[in-house]
Image: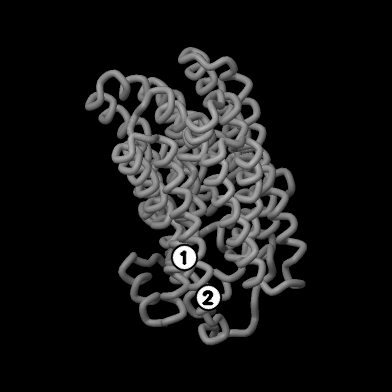
């Protein structure tokens, strides 16, 4: 079973590897080197989140339409191929956007759309396969291994990418993206070899929920409504900096593409460390307290990033990145626990779908509004750095608002059952909602 868990982790790694160059290095090159609108970059980067509702349909379709007796592997392979296609074409798309806007926009929708569709196709399929292979009792261990391998791969990919683009040239960028795409395809292929057993039996029916049903469940309970808005505001703030942090490093401090790419690896290490710390704290420290620590840490990180831009200090900037990573990790584990606490035993699928919907909405809003606000402020002030600083300051304010909302949420008033799953089980169920 351990070997199959590692194979599942390899698939998770393959998809995550394709995210790093698109969501970090390319964003910086498009905004800083090619002077492409951050709003447009944000819209293109948000396509995976726009496509996220199709995960329910994909999961249901693959349940009922096996290919050669395989219900998951063909869809996983198709998803990885689309992710790799998006990665290898994305640099050319960026260069075309700089030369011919409208042709670049069309190419961008195709390229980033392919990656977004591949991400949703692969992720819902391999999480379903992980659940089926592991069984109820082993699911948590499988997800824990997949999660650890994924975070580690992001760190290694960011370090390797930073080396391949040093010194930066368009040719080096294209070559590095091809290398990552090919490696991801090989890793994903290894993960799929004899992973799934052929089964020609008809699948059991699978219960799904519409967005309307999920909204209805949330609005019926005051504390569920508060938690929904808390998640959206918190995650939009923490995740909204994804496309802006590296371009900011280049704009404010003159960092090279290699230096800004390493920001992702630093952030990843801090997230991984804080995830381990949060796991140790589970059951020993109140989860709401840990959630507050995470939010305060991320808030302090944003404020330090703002200060670094004002005083032009890379030391303060890196300290801010460290706090952002630590705060994100603490917030992730504690809010996954709270998410399970805010889920009734009678409607697990319904509420987990609702919290997954909150995650998708927050990522979309944080990415698009962050990019648009940066452009507006930069244009009005004729100061590109100021645009970033305003966005980071607003994200710090959003974290403060989320902390106020957290204080008003009464978990015990929401719960219908006092029996709570373990940390490992929480991570397993929450991963299926993302």
Q: Position of residue 285 (x, y in %)?
A: 73, 72
Which of marks 2 and 1 precedes in the sequence? 2
Binning the other alpha carbons within 10 Å of mark 1 as few (below 14), some (14 to 19) or many (20 upward) gives many
* Residue position for label 1: 355
In terms of image quadrants, where is residue 3? top right
Which secondary structure, mark 2?
A: loop
In the displayed structure, would residue 413 be above or below residue 116? below
The residue located at (44%, 71%) in the rendering is: 350
In the displayed structure, would residue 116 be above or below residue 219? above
The residue located at (68%, 63%) in the rendering is: 424
Residue that sits furthest to the left in the current view:
102
Do callouts 1 and 2 mark residues in contact (Cβ within 8 Å)?
yes
Binning the other alpha carbons within 10 Å of mark 2 as few (below 14), some (14 to 19) or many (20 upward) gives many
Residue that sits furthest to the front in the current view:
311
Q: Where is residue 95 in the image (x, y as percent from the top left)?
A: 36, 20
Which secondary structure, mark 1?
A: helix
The residue located at (58%, 61%) in the rendering is: 295
The residue located at (48%, 18%) in the rendering is: 174
In the displayed structure, would residue 408 be above or below residue 33? below
Give 34 or 432, whichever is nearer the viewer: 34
* Residue position for label 2: 342
Asked if one can make out residue 115 in the rendered structure from this viewpoint, the answer is: yes
Gap between marks 1 and 2, in whole Å? 9 Å
In the displayed structure, would residue 216 be above or below residue 55? below
Q: Position of residue 102 (x, y in %)?
A: 22, 27
Asked if one can make out residue 132 in the rendered structure from this viewpoint, the answer is: no
């Amino acid at each position: 079973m351990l070997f199959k868990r590692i194979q599942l982790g390899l698939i998770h790694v393959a998809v995550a590897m394709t995210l790093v160059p698109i969501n970090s290095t390319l964003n910086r090159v498009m905004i800083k080197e090619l002077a492409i609108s951050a709003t447009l970059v944000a819209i293109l980067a948000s396509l995976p989140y726009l496509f996220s509702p199709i995960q329910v349909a994909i999961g249901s379709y693959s349940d009922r339409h096996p290919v050669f007796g395989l219900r998951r592997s063909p869809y996983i392979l198709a998803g990885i191929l689309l992710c790799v296609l998006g990665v290898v074409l994305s640099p050319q798309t960026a260069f075309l956007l700089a030369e011919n806007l409208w042709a670049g926009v069309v190419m961008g929708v195709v390229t980033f759309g392919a990656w977004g569709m591949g991400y949703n196709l692969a992720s819902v399929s391999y999480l379903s396969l992980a659940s089926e292979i592991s069984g109820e009792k082993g699911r948590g261990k499988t997800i824990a291994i997949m999660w650890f391998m994924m975070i580690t791969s992001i760190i290694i990919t960011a370090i390797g990418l930073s080396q391949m683009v040093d010194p930066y040239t368009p040719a080096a960028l294209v070559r590095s993206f091809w290398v990552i795409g090919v490696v991801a395809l090989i890793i994903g292929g290894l993960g799929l070899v004899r992973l799934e057993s052929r089964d020609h039996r008809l699948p059991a029916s699978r219960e799904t929920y519409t967005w309307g049903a999920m909204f209805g469940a949330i609005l019926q309970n005051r504390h569920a409504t508060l938690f929904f808005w808390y998640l959206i505001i918190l995650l939009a703030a923490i995740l909204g900096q994804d496309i802006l942090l590296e371009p900011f490093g280049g704009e404010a401090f003159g960092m090279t593409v290699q230096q800004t790419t390493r920001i992702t690896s630093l952030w990843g290490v801090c997230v991984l460390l804080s995830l381990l710390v949060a796991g140790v704290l589970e059951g020993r420290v109140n989860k709401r307290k840990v959630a507050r620590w995470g939010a305060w840490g991320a808030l302090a990180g944003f404020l330090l990033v703002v200060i670094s831009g004002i005083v032009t200090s890379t030391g303060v900037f890196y300290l801010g990145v460290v706090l952002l990573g630590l705060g994100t990790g603490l917030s992730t584990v504690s809010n996954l626990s709270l998410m399970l606490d805010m889920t009734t035993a009678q409607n697990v699928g319904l509420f987990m779908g609702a919290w997954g919907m909150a995650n998708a909405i927050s990522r979309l809003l944080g990415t698009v509004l962050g990019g648009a606000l940066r452009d507006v402020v930069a244009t009005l002030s004729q100061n590109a750095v100021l645009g970033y600083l305003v966005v980071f300051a607003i994200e710090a304010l959003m974290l403060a608002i989320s902390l106020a909302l957290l204080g008003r949420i009464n978990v015990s008033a929401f719960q219908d059952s006092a029996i709570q799953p373990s940390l490992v089980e929480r991570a397993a169920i929450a991963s299926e909602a993302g």
